[in-house]
Image: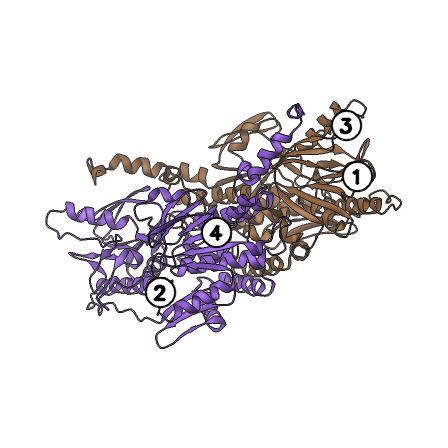
Chain colours: A brown, B purple
């Protein structure tokens, strides 16, 4: 085994993992990328899939295809179930994988702040499967509304609630508002989709709280134009299949709403906990303390304390050496960290001096609101409206991995912009007919003539 | 109820149903389109979705969107569970629906010739859910092959069998051959995808038996170029999760093959049987005899014997007045019949004389083989190869419903043609890790050090 190359194992093929693999392309190493899905996902546009504006394949690309030219890299479709920092091995659904250098970049998942039972009635948006499930839920609510027999039932079906006023919540609520008011405008005969209510519920004082304060009212105005009601200072205390209970100040109230979506909280992937547990069981190592949302604190070189061979990147890590507060969990931070870690390993293998500490060049933040508005919070510039939207479009299409995706997305968007059509509004999977028919079916069953069942 | 309009109920929003609704757009009638999915599907391209070349949304369009300008038409998402030809009602999952004129156009489904247990191990291709399930199955076989520990296991994983040498089978086998030899060429490290075997098994003497005899060898030659082995005169007698037993003449043999796909037989939708049963239970009506594959014979005006108010169209019907043999079950026949039936009802409502008997203008048949070959069997012309492929591309893109789909499909294809990329090769849904890891996991588990599970 003396001629064995240095083994780099990268867990997660998101922006961080992929960029790390790319930076290692010419390294004299055996690189293994482990991911539990076969595709890289452009998460910032997931809400477009959830509302039928784009297809899953438009915002994703096969990991193998993206790394096929990295001849030193192999891809393993597997789920990581354990880490042993002493033995330098990972436990996975495809057996044990040994590493010399390890890069952990598995991102984040939803957090229901301890109310895990809410997950069933308020799905969140992190994967393509999440997005198609939400798309299905939203579109089926309109179908059931068309068949509803009572006004009460129809109103609950046509009330969509998005919990969480961050960028994802704002984008999702805006897209549902547009779907109802524009795309589906002429599609129903028993109700007017323009009467759809979209509620954006935020516990804090303003939406987009991580953005400059002046942008929040701009965003609220854009949202109200497409029918989104913003409810700030509003705490959700209960979520059922039929609606939510909210608390504003001291008063609680019940809002009937058949479709509730979760965009309120994230927590780091469970790999952070696995790493911390394995380090704790080591006798001679320092203990790592995860932060409040389960992120792993890393040093200026993006490695974990006492383990220069383990890098933790992107949403899974907490890097606060630059500003004192952790860098935000966005694609651009993750991508920059991936490149940095990949280069650091390359340098080590060549015996070069270590890199300078990681430094993120913050170009700013963008959030989109519907078809033609956005807010941009750039380094020296803040703006909203149509210009921000165009800028957002440009940046996102530029960032999309793979030539074909870019072209397709541009065609889809150009066409969607001019026609207000959302051609990907597909309902897939097995349907629950009782749910769709709702009260109509019950009533119809009552009025059936006896003996009809025999037909 | 005296001012109630004539109620036309159309079951099925395929080519027949959609064209019927369109022909009725200006009719003084209440038109209801009932379908159990929310989208119209361009079935001829389903095999492209199954092999990752196109996205589901590229070959489908929401029924509501397609009919939103038909102000006299409403769409009901429901499954039809019974027909009462005496009471003039349909039983559906959304209750009872009454009709004055009825159009049945629910198409066809797979037939396993009585071996329904084969369905589990040899899925067929009729819906988008079928296509994404097959895509998943095919892509997971490659993933598992990358992780296989024994050559035997890898060979079974890399042997793909398509049963049925009609157009669907030919197109599907060709697309898998291309996927393996071109798209995935550089994607794996533990085996060469070019070694993939694709078997096209046909019981009859030649593939494409409904085409002119001279085209079959042309198709075989094109298929062999992309690595498809054609096995004619070969009967399948058993299908399991691990392979198939075939019979050639008197000798039987076992072929290990982890991925078996069914393109061998279709039967009419169960609505034909429901109609026949309801007619039989009528006292004063003639009995309708379904044909061998469950199709409903119709008269020259496309209605069923004794029921001028019931039209049966497309794959669900058997129309043999033109050539003595039933018209084939293709999109162009269905579309023409839909327009004919819609116009017939319009004329009746206006009190005009009935239309001339239905006559199908046959322009010919086309089947595509891989990325750059096809066979065309037109009225006065038969050709194969690249020219036929281009013609096929032109015709199909032209036929795709909706402007946006056309543009997207053209971009996808142009890009796919030049890059041999298939960007839609997504694996979605929950994964079975044991299946992917196969023998690797078993072996790895054996070699684990005791106590590792505690980590």
- Residue that label 2 marks: B332
Q: Is residue A72 above or below residue A117?
A: below
Residue on which disc 3 sits: A288
Looking at the rendered structure, whether the residues under marks 3 and 4 are on a common chain is answered as no
Mark 1–mark 3 Cα distance, whole angstroms, equals 14 Å
The image shows residue A233 at horizontal and vertical percentages of: 63, 33
Where does the N terminus of chain A fall, quadrant-wise?
A: top right
Q: Which mark is residue A302?
A: 1
Across and down, in percent, residue A17 comes to: 70, 44
Which structural element holds mark 2?
Answer: helix
Crowding at mark 3 (Cα within 10 Å: few <14, some 14-19, many 20+): many
Circles 3 and 2, Cβ within 8 Å, touching? The answer is no
Q: Residue at x 32, y 38 (%)?
A: A441
Chain letter belonging to callout 1: A
The answer to whether tags 4 and 2 share a subunit is yes
Q: Label 4 vs label 2: CA separation?
A: 31 Å
Considering only order in the chain, which callout, 3 or 1, is on the residue closer to the N terminus? Answer: 3
Indicate which disc residue B160 carries: 4
Same-subunit check for callouts 2 and 1: no
Estimate the spatial distance between the alpha carbons at disc 2 and disc 1, rounded to whole Å.
61 Å
Q: What chain does badge 2 belong to?
A: B
- Residues B167 and A356: in front is B167
Give the farthest residue toward the right: A353
- Same chain shared by disc 1 and disc 3: yes
Mark 1: secondary structure? loop
Instruction: Please tell me how crowded label 2 is: few (under 14), some (14-19), or many (20+) other residues with Cα within 10 Å.
Output: many
């Amino acid at each position: 085994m003396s001629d064995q190359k240095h083994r780099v194992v990268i867990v997660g093929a998101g922006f961080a993992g992929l960029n790390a693999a790319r930076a290692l392309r010419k390294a004299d190493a055996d690189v293994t990328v482990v991911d539990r899905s076969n595709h890289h996902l452009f998460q910032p546009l997931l809400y477009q899939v959830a509302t039928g504006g784009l297809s899953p394949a438009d915002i994703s690309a096969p990991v193998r295809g993206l790394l096929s030219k990295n001849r030193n890299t192999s891809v393993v479709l597997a789920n990581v179930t354990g880490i042993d920092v002493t033995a330098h091995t990972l436990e996975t659904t495809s057996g044990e994988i040994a590493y010399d250098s390890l890069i952990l970049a598995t991102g984040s998942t939803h957090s229901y702040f301890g109310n895990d039972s809410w997950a069933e009635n308020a799905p969140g948006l992190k994967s393509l499967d999440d997005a198609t499930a939400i798309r299905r839920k939203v579109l089926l609510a309109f179908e059931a509304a068309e068949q509803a027999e009572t006004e009460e039932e129809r109103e609950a079906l046509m009330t969509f609630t998005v919990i969480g006023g961050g960028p994802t919540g704002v984008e999702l609520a805006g897209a549902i508002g547009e779907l109802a008011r524009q795309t589906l405008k002429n599609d129903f005969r028993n109700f007017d989709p323009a009467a759809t209510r979209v509620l954006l519920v935020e516990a804090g004082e303003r939406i987009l709280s991580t953005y400059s304060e002046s942008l929040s009212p701009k965003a609220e105005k854009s949202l109200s134009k497409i029918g989104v009601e913003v409810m700030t200072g509003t705490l959700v205390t209960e979520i059922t299949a039929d609606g939510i209970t909210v608390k504003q100040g001291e008063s609680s109230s019940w809002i009937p709403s058949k479709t509730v979506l979760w965009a309120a909280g994230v927590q780091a992937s469970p790999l952070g906990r696995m790493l911390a547990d394995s380090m704790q069981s080591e006798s001679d190592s320092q203990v790592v303390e995860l932060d409040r949302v389960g992120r792993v604190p890393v040093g200026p070189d993006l490695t974990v304390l006492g383990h220069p061979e383990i890098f933790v990147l992107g949403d899974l890590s907490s890097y606060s050496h630059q500003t004192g507060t952790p860098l935000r969990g966005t694609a651009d931070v993750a991508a920059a960290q991936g490149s940095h870690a990949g280069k650091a390993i390359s340098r080590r293998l060549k015996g070069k001096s270590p890199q300078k500490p990681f430094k993120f060049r913050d170009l700013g933040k963008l959030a989109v609101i519907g078809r033609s508005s956005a807010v941009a919070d750039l380094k020296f510039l803040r703006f909203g409206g149509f210009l921000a939207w165009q800028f957002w479009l440009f940046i996102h299409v530029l960032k999309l991995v793979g030539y074909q995706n870019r072209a397709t997305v541009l065609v889809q968007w150009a066409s969607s912009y001019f026609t207000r059509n959302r051609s990907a509004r597909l309902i897939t999977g097995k349907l629950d007919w009782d749910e769709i028919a709702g009260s109509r079916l019950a009533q119809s069953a009552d009025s059936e003539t006896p003996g009809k069942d025999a037909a």
